[in-house]
Amino acid sequence: MKDENIKNKEILTTLVRVRGSKVKVVSVKSTEPIEKRLFIECSKALGRIYVSAPISEGNLICKNILNTGVDIIATKSI
């Protein structure tokens, strides 16, 4: 049963829009695997977010996305 739960989870990677920079997006990822069935809803939620420059790698972008207990962090600095 535990193997089944692991198979249905993955690290979410996507982009979030940036304000105040020539770079228009920053890559982000989940700090822990998220159930794959939540990927579309998470992407929709992150699509409504704008972050302001400067951003450092590891900065918290979204805390506890969709009440999953998983945070979203930046994967590069801008």
Image: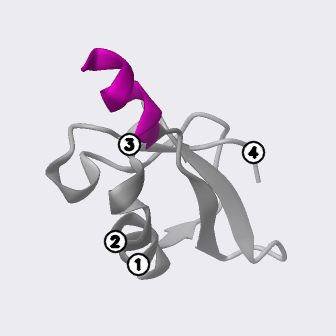
In this view, 69 is above or below 45? above
Q: For the residue marked with disc 2, what is the amino acid? A: Glu
Asked if marks 4 and 2 touch (Cβ < 8 Å), the reply is no
Please say if 44 is above or below 64. below
Q: Which amino acid is tagged 3?
A: Ile
Residue identifier under label 4: 77
**Coordinates of residue 12 in the picture (x, y in percent):** 53, 49
Q: Which of marks 3 and 1 is in front?
A: 3
Is disc 2 placed on a helix, strand or loop?
helix
SS class, disc 4: loop
The one of 35 and 14 positioned closer to us in this rendering: 35
- Mark 3 neighbour class, 10 Å CA radius: few under 14, some 14 to 19, many 20 or more: many
Mark 4: amino acid: Ser
Residue 51 visible at all = yes
Question: What secondary structure is found at the residue carrying circle 3?
Answer: strand
Going by the numbered disc 1, the residue's amino acid type is: Lys
Q: Residue at x 50, y 39 (%)?
A: 10
The quarter of the displayed image where residue 3 is located: top left
